[in-house]
Amino acid sequence: MYKVYLSRSCNPCFNLALEEYLVRHAGPSDQILFLWQNQNTVVIGRNQNPWKECDLEALDRQKGRLIRRLSGGGAVYHDLGNLNFTFISAFTEEKIKENIGLIIKALDCNGIEAVFSGKNDILAQGYKVSGNAFFVEDEILCHHGTLLVDSDLKRLGQILTVSQKKLQSKGIDSVKSRVINMKELNRELSIEGLRTDLTDMFLPQGPDSFIYWMDEEEIGDHHVCLEAVHELKKKYESWEWNFGESPEFNLQLSHRFPWGETDLYMLVKDGKIFKIKVFTDALDINLPEKLEAKLLDLKFDEKRLIELIAIIGSSRFATSEKP
């Protein structure tokens, strides 16, 4: 049975929850294509470190979100100039090649000559236009990826560029690639047109082909239990999944407070401060010990951490002028 699901939602938590639901409930004979978009979102791989993969402060300033997906691979930026696809089917060695072939055929029909490169990229004129990732659960393949149509590449570069900190991580780093919007290669290309082309190429003619438009709340004939999707959505909304699942890493953080320069050396594990050592030139000789006791086992959030340190260290003795 061939099914195409088209999401009207731009909420990454809903879309990734729906994707997971479709994978969990796919039968061995199902052939599913899910097309979706996210608004202003960084999606990281299953084993990546969010603090290393993107500028979280910049993402926060721009009201963006960070979400961890189920598949491996690198970090990607999603906005409404980007079309995401998911193929779901029984796993075979040839299935990924078939899926890639369909994507390349759809691009070719739009005047874009594309090739598959390396393990998971689709290139056009030597530039990356699509990244792909995969996972298999109970012999069901989930193959998903991005299509850069008219994305904000400047914002992509800003958010996926991490400010230089002394950070060492055991997670998987993203490989930076040259990217291009396919709109630069074909001014007539649109998200709507590409979505239609992919749908038409995927669905065979016949009674076993179905198209479903999906909303977060609307109940339709799509045979999807939205209550179950919203239950899965809670995971993608949670700090525990998006940050707490991070691999452990060491971080040095330096900041100048009113009382002087302060250096923190931390081991962050499961998203929390597991070990910490503080060095400072503050007059309060007990300040490092106070900070270490207060900060240990807190969720690591650099902005809130700096604010908390400023409060803890704001005693008259700590902030008094040096002789």
Image (cartoon, rainbow, N blue to C red):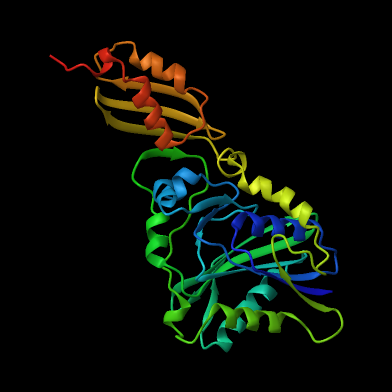
Tell whether 4 sits left or right of 145: right
Please name whichever residue, 176 or 183, is drawn nearer the observer in this view of the structure.
Answer: 183
Residue at the spot 52% in from the left edge and 88% down from the top edge: 111
Q: Is residue 31 above or below residue 290?
A: below
Residue at the spot 56% in from the left edge and 86% down from the top edge: 108
Picture coordinates of residue 74, whole percent (x, y): 53, 55
State the image quarter where residue 291 is shown.
top left
Q: Is residue 128 above or below residue 174?
A: below
Please name whichever residue, 321 or 152, is drawn nearer the observer in this view of the structure.
Answer: 321
Residue lying furthest front: 218
Picture coordinates of residue 263, whole percent (x, y): 32, 27
Tell whether 10 sits left or right of 221: left
Q: Is residue 299 visible?
A: yes
Q: Is residue 9 above or below residue 280?
A: below
Tell whether 117 sits left or right of 4: left
Quadrant containing the C terminus is top left
Residue at the spot 39% in from the left edge and 27% down from the top edge: 265
Residue lying furthest left: 323
Please tell me how many numbered marks the rendered image carries. Answer: 0
Please name whichever residue, 281 or 14, is drawn nearer the observer in this view of the structure.
Answer: 14
Q: Is residue 94 visible?
A: no
Please name whichever residue, 118 or 206, is drawn nearer the observer in this view of the structure.
Answer: 206
Picture coordinates of residue 234, whole percent (x, y): 67, 46
Picture coordinates of residue 121, whole percent (x, y): 54, 68
Quadrant containing the N terminus is bottom right
Residue at the spot 36% in from the left edge and 27% down from the top edge: 264
State the image quarter where residue 252 is shown.
top left
